[in-house]
Image: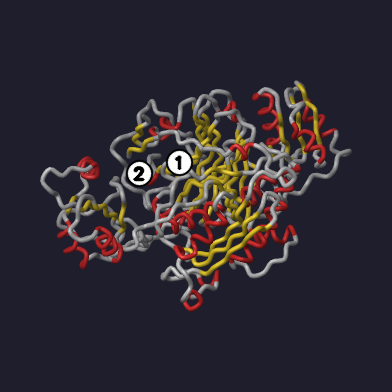
Amino acid sequence: MRRCLRHAALVIWPAARRSASVSSPAHKWAVVDVETSGLSARSHRVLSVAAAALDERGNVEDSFESLLDPGCDPGPVHIHGLTRERLAGSPQFAEVSSRLNRILSGRVLVAHNAAFDHGFLQAESIRAGLDDPVTHRLCTVALSRRIGVPVPNHRLDTLASYWRIPRGQAHVAADDVRVLVDVFRRSRELADRLAMPLPVVATADLGVIRPDPPAWSKRRCDWSWPGRLAPGAPLVQGMKVVITGDTRRPRETLCQMAEDAGLEIMSSVSKFTSVVVCNRAAGFESSKLVRAADLGTHVIDEATLLRLLPQVLPGAPRTASTATPRTAPPRPTAAPAASQPQLPPAAPSSATAPAARERRPAPGRYAQRRVLVLGGPHDHAADIRALVVAGGGAAAVNLSLNVTDLVALLGAEQDRRVEKARAAGVRVHLGGGVPAAELLARLLAQEDAAAAPVASGDEALELPRGGVVDLPAASEWTVRASWRVDEAPGADVDVVALLLDQDGRVSTDEDFVFYNQPSSDRDAVRLVVDGPHEQSVAIDLDQLPDHCDRIVVAAAVGGGPTFGDVGAIELNVDHPDGSFVTATLDAATSERTLVLTELYLRAGTWRVRVVGQGYDHGLAELAASHGVAVDDR
C-alpha cells in the first residue's frame, strides 16, 4: 500500500481562533438541513433541503426550502415521510441551486452534524457540474459538546428539549432549520460567556466527497469471504474481485454483474483478494498485477469472468460483528521488522467478563469533579490531572459548563478564562508552584464552602491509561479526540485510524484512514473533522471487513511542535445515545505521535482500551510499523 503522507494540515480560519460572539459580531451564517435517501453522500441523494441566512447577530435575513426529486428510491420513508408520490414533480437539485447558493455564498454553513449535510450538498453540486459555494462550516453538535451542555446526548431533539424550544415534526428540513437557528443563537451566547472560540473549519483541506458513477454504486456484500479462487475452480459468493486495465464492457456494468452474483468489488489487491480480472494486452503492466504476482493471486480475463458468473456457488452469510467472532484470515509470511515500534499487547480478557456498567469503579474522593488545569510546566499540570482521574474525577482540557474546578498554575494569572470561570461559578484555585498532592488537598478542603458541582448529563466511564472495558452490543461508535483551543501555534494535529488483522497489519489500502483518505471500504471507518481542535473517527462495526479484528486510533502533530506543546488530549468513545468512555491523555515532552485507543475483538465481544502510548517519530513511521508502504516525499 502506497500513500503519500504529505502533511495536509487543517487550514484554520482566523476567526475560529477567537470568540465569534453575539456581542461582537463578525460573520454571517447559513443554517442548513437536508433529508436524504440514505447515509452515504457518494451513493444516496438529497430529497429535501432548507436553509436560513443569518446576519452577524443571528437574525434571519432570508430563507429557502424545497423538496427535490432525484428520481431514485427515497430510502427510509418511515423516518422522513418523503414517498415517491410526495416527491413527484419536485425540481432537481440543479434547478434550485442558484436560489440555495444565494444563501450559502459568503456565509459559514451551520448544520447539526455539518460533515453530513455539507457532504451531501457537495456531492449534489458535483453531479450538477456546479462549484461548491461553501468555504467554511460549523457543526452545532461539536459546539454543544465543547460548551458542555448538560444533556445525555447532543441530538437536535434533546437540545430542543433542554432549551425549551417548541418542536414540530422531526426530520422535516424546514422545522429542523427553525429549531437549529435557536439552538445556535443560545450556544453562541454560552460560548461567549466562556471565552470559547467557535469551532469553524475551512473546507478547502477536508477533501471532496465525489459521488459514485450513476451506472454503479458499490453495495455491501452480505457474504463472508470464502478464500481465494483456485485455477479451474468456480467462484463463490463473498469472493473479493479486483478489475484492472481496459475492459470490453463498461467497467461499471462488470462491477454490477459481479455484485449481483454475490461477489465483492475491491479497489486494491491484498492477501484477501480472491481473483484479479485483467485483459492482458501486450506490454500492459499495473501495480495491481505486480501485487497479485507477489501474493500468488489468480488472474483471469474478462471472458472467463463472464463465463464463471452464472455458476457462482452459494456462500456463507456474513454474521454481525457484535455477536460472532470473525474467522481469522491466513497469516502473512513476512513478520514486522523488529526495529519498528509496536503497540503494547491487548489486555487479557475473559468471555465471561462482567458487563461494563457493573465494573464501574466506586466513587472516589474527586467524584463529580471535573478539573481544568491552566498554565504551569507540563509535568506539573499532568500530575494534577492524573491525581484527579485516579481519585474518580475527570480532567478537562477546555473551559465548559461542566467544569467544576479550575486550577491556575504559574503563567495562568492573565488568562481571561480564569475570570470567565469565576463569573460562571466555577471554583478557582490559585496553585502557583504548589506540588500537585498538596494543591488537591486544598481543593478538597474547599469543597464544603463551594457551590455544588454542575451536573454534566454525562455518565461516561472515566478510564485511566491502560483501562479496558467491554462495549455494549451496538454497531455504531465514535472515537473523538479534542485538545485545548490555545495550543502552540503551528501545532497541527491529525487523527488517523488503522484497521488491523490478527497480526497487527493493514491488509489493503482502504485500511488506513487519514486526511488524504478519510474513509475505509463501505464507509466502515470514517474520519470527521468537527472543528479546529476536535476530530472524530466514526465506526460501524457491522460494516468492517472480515479480516479486521482491531481498530487503532492515533494522533500525530505536524511541524516543529510536539504533544508536549499541544498538551492533554481528551478522548471520548461515544454511542448514538451519549458518551460511554472518556479519558485524558498526557504525553511527555517530545512525542510527535500518540496512540489514543484501540477497539478490538476478543471472544466474540468488542472491547475498548485506552492506550496513551507516545512515540518520538512521525505519522509515516507509525503507519509503516503496521504495514502501510509510505511515500513521505
Q: From the image, state whether disc 2 or disc 1 is nearer to you.
A: 1
Residue pointed to by mark 1: 515
Residue 268 is left or right of residue 385, and the answer is: left
Residue 594 is left or right of residue 283, and the answer is: right
User: Where 590 falls versus 60 (above or below)?
Assistant: above
In the rendered image, the quadrant that contains the N terminus is top left
Q: Few, some or many C-alpha atoms within 10 Å of disc 1 (few <14, some 14-19, many ≥20)?
A: many
Q: Are marks 2 and 1 in contact (CB under 8 Å)?
A: no
Callout 2, which amino acid?
Answer: Asp
User: Where 279 falls versus 482 (above or below)?
Assistant: below
Q: Residue at x 85, y 33 (%)?
A: 445
Q: How is the image coloured?
A: secondary structure
Callout 1, which amino acid?
Answer: Tyr
Q: Residue furthest right?
A: 449
Q: Of marks 2 and 1, which one's residue comes earlier in the chain? A: 2
Q: Residue furthest top?
A: 433
Residue 619 spot, x, y in % from top left: 45, 32
Badge 2 marks a residue whose secondary structure is helix
Residue 509: image tag: 2
Residue 256 is left or right of residue 296, and the answer is: right
Q: Is residue 440 visible?
A: yes
Badge 1 marks a residue whose secondary structure is loop
Q: Nearer the viewer, residue 409 or 345?
A: 409
In the rendered image, the quadrant that contains the C terminus is top left
Count numbered badges in the picture: 2
Q: Residue at x 66, y 40 (%)?
A: 197
Q: Nearer the viewer, residue 296 or 152?
A: 152
Q: Residue at x 19, y 52 (%)?
A: 246
